[in-house]
Image: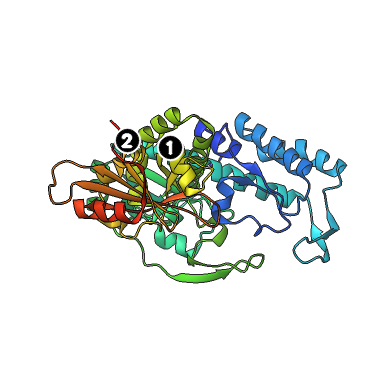
């Protein structure tokens, strides 16, 4: 389970924190939800040097296991020296108004320390969960050591679901500011035992020593059943007052924490890796794309599409036909008309389809690619369609399906053949 006490955070957790870019913001809602996976911000810290001081202090605290007291004692004088302390008048860049706002304070530093520590540990724990889910395929939601618990979190205690269940997409702990709830990874055998015998009631009364009359620190033996289905969702609407964006979250989740830091980090790393493929030569980019599509990353994406993956690398002539500056064809949620009709193994063929297939440019600016497939005489071709996005000029896979010889001939007649035969 994630440890919220002082002590150096694991390597995965530290990497999550260090991967973030600095982002100034006047309000804590200026950087929201999943954006925290790639952006480090402190509300009202409108200068990068202030943000840099706070991040450097947190980095040292996480890496060396410093307590909040040590973190605060070292950072407070630096912020005071730069004038970022107490209540002051500041300009809100969104409204143009000057407002009296709280800058640095002991309470704010504590929130900054705890929030970053817990989200980093959660992200690190998720990476370890993914590495060990073959032998420990379930997660158990547990209450933490807080004296007072949120009502919904109490209701979620004892929820036992597979690691890859969608419920963990936004219920991975922590679930709010100050939340100390946690998840514990369990094996198949342990899950079966829990289902038979139940688990310790986290709210059972503390035992009293019969001789001394003093509390022992142990809870009375009382069990509750585990829940093998996700708890009922009670959706509430939340409006971000800075952006106007309306989101739906399960009641009991603070909207700012309705994320899974570990999953969000994987998405950010995938997106960054996909973008960096434009900076390397085609041979290396093609090899990297094949490695990604042959890895468990693809299966995870197909099961729960989130972020972008590199589907293939197109050659220079195809780039020219598409009027594109990028060589990367991206696989993104919502771009394919019928993604559920495709199996993981079908997606694995994409690098070869895109890199080696017959290329035919279309009048609408798209590119259709045909690559032969084995074992189906009625539909002997893979057919992939690539389009350039008008928003960001990226290339996206917009259709991918099996095709007939007639499909190939019709596309040939309507378009301009760029590469007439398949590459070996």
Please give the name of the residue rendered at 77% of the width and 60% of the height, measured from the top-left corner: 93
The relative height of residue 266 versus residue 89 in the rendered view (above or below) is above
The disc at residue 171 is: none
- Residue nearest the viewer, comparing 281 with 22: 281
Write down the quadrant of residue 186 in the picture: top left
Q: Mark 1 or 2 closer to N-term?
A: 2
Q: Position of residue 119 (x, y in %)?
A: 55, 45
Give the position of the N terminus as an image quadrant: top left
Please give the name of the residue rendered at 43% of the width and 57% of the height, measured from the top-left corner: 203
The answer to whether residue 81 is seen in the rendering is: yes
Give the position of the C terminus as an image quadrant: top left
Write down the quadrant of residue 60 in the picture: top right
- Residue nearest the viewer, comparing 166 with 204: 166
Q: Position of residue 372 (x, y in %)?
A: 22, 42
| Residue position marked by numbered label 2 in the rendering | 294
The disc at residue 315 is: 1
Q: Position of residue 188 (x, y in %)?
A: 25, 43
Please give the name of the residue rendered at 47% of the width and 48% of the height, measured from the top-left corner: 322
Q: Secondary structure at mark 2?
A: loop
Could you classify mark 2 by the number of other residues whose Cα lies within 10 Å: few (under 14), some (14-19), or many (20 or more)? some
């Amino acid at each position: 389970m994630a440890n919220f006490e002082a002590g150096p955070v694991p390597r995965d957790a530290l990497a999550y924190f260090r991967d973030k870019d600095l982002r100034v913001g006047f309000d804590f809602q200026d950087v929201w939800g999943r954006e925290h996976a790639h952006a480090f911000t402190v509300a009202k810290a409108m200068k990068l040097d202030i943000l840099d001081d706070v991040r450097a202090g947190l980095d040292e605290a996480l890496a060396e296991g410093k307590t909040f007291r040590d973190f605060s004692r070292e950072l407070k004088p630096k912020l005071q020296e730069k004038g970022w302390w107490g209540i002051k008048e500041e300009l809100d860049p969104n409204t143009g108004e000057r407002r009296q706002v709280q800058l640095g304070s002991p309470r704010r530093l504590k929130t900054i320390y705890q929030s970053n520590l817990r989200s980093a540990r959660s992200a690190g724990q998720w990476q370890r969960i993914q590495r060990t889910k073959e032998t420990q395929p379930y997660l158990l939601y547990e209450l933490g050591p807080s004296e007072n618990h949120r009502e919904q979190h109490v209701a979620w205690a004892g929820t036992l679901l597979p690691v890859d269940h969608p419920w963990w997409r936004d219920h991975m702990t922590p679930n709010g500011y100050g939340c100390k709830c946690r998840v514990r990874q369990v094996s198949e055998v342990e899950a079966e035992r829990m289902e038979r015998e139940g688990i310790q009631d986290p709210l059972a009364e503390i035992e009293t020593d019969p001789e001394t009359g003093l509390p022992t620190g142990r809870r009375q033996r009382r069990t509750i059943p585990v829940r093998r289905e996700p708890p009922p969702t009670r959706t509430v609407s939340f409006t971000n007052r800075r952006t106007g964006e309306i989101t739906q979250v399960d009641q009991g989740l603070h909207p700012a924490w309705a994320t899974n830091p570990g999953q969000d980090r994987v998405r950010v790393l995938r997106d960054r890796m996909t973008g960096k493929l434009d900076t390397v030569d085609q041979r290396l980019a093609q090899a990297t794309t094949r490695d990604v599509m042959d890895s468990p990353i693809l299966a995870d994406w197909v099961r729960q599409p989130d972020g972008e993956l590199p589907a293939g690398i197109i050659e220079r002539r195809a780039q020219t036909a598409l009027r594109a500056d990028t060589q990367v064809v991206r696989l993104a949620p919502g771009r394919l008309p019928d993604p559920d009709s495709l199996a993981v193994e079908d997606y694995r063929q994409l690098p070869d389809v895109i890199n080696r297939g017959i290329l035919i440019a279309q009048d609408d600016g798209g590119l259709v690619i045909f690559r032969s497939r084995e074992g189906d005489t009625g539909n002997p071709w893979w057919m992939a369609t690539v389009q350039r996005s008008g928003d960001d000029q990226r290339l996206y896979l917009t259709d991918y399906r099996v095709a007939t010889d007639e499909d190939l001939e019709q596309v040939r007649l309507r378009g301009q053949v760029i590469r007439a035969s398949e590459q070996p």
